[in-house]
Amino acid sequence: MSTTLTRSRGAARWRTVDLLTAAVLGVAFGVVFWGWGVVYTALTPVFAAVPFVQSLLSGVWLLPAVVAALVVRRPGAALLAEMVAASVEALLGSHWGFSVLISGAIQGFGVELAVALFAWRRFGPPVAVLGGVLAALLEGVYELHAYYAGVWTLPFQVVYVACFVVSGAVVAGLGGWALVRGLARSGALGAFAAGRDHRRG
């Protein structure tokens, strides 16, 4: 995929295929979230010994927002996909219950912020990584207040958020970009600018 300048004209105009794709991505990732939550919960003894390790694995939960932003390229796409994914995860029986909806909103907003900084005109790896970083930073700070307030010292909190940011950059940012490239190569994104970028090389 070539790098990634898209026209701002019509950027805010949603097509039916945009809405359906964001929703389908959200549902698919919601199932992934549920399975990943089972694995995550099974690793609780490891997290008890080395708590910050859990944030290194948390970038997975940011993926639908990054992927939807790169594919759909419309304001709100990241937030929609992330909220659908969180809703599906909650309905399937998330370990964290419906509190995942709060996380979904925070994570989706982080990616939306990254894309908005470039006026929905650039969708290359730097934007994907920035989206993962901002989503991870916001979610990491939220989790410290929601789950670990008064439990960890400041240095531990900083390490936790830093590891989350690394995971956001690598797993969600670069991983999300690689996933979109793979989808484009397969021809699945023919209706989107992401697919046309790939064909142009």
Image (tube, grey):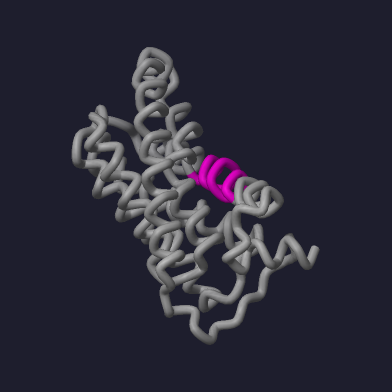
Q: Residue sitting at 34 percent across and 21 percent down?
A: 41
Q: Residue sitting at 48 percent across and 40 percent down?
A: 59
Secondary structure that dominates the magenta span? helix
The quadrant holding residue 94 is top left
Please count the marks in the image. 0
- Is residue 148 positioned above or below 120 on the image? above
Query: Is 45 or 185 nearer to us in this picture?
Result: 185
Q: Position of residue 18 (x, y in %)?
A: 45, 65
- Taking the magenta stretch, the answer to whether it contains residue 187 is no
Query: Is 136 or 109 nearer to us in this picture?
Result: 109
Q: Position of residue 197 (x, y in %)?
A: 70, 66
Query: Is 23 or 64 nearer to us in this picture?
Result: 23
The residue most toward the bottom is 9
Q: Residue sitting at 80 percent across and 63 percent down?
A: 201
Question: Which quadrant is home to the N terminus?
Answer: bottom right
The quadrant holding residue 100 is top left
- Is residue 63 positioned above or below 9 on the image? above
The residue most toward the left is 98
- Is residue 66 positioned above or below 153 on the image? below
The residue stretch that appears in magenta: 165-176
Q: Position of residue 8 (x, y in %)?
A: 55, 83
- Taking the magenta stretch, the answer to whether it contains residue 174 is yes
Q: Position of residue 78 (x, y in %)?
A: 42, 59
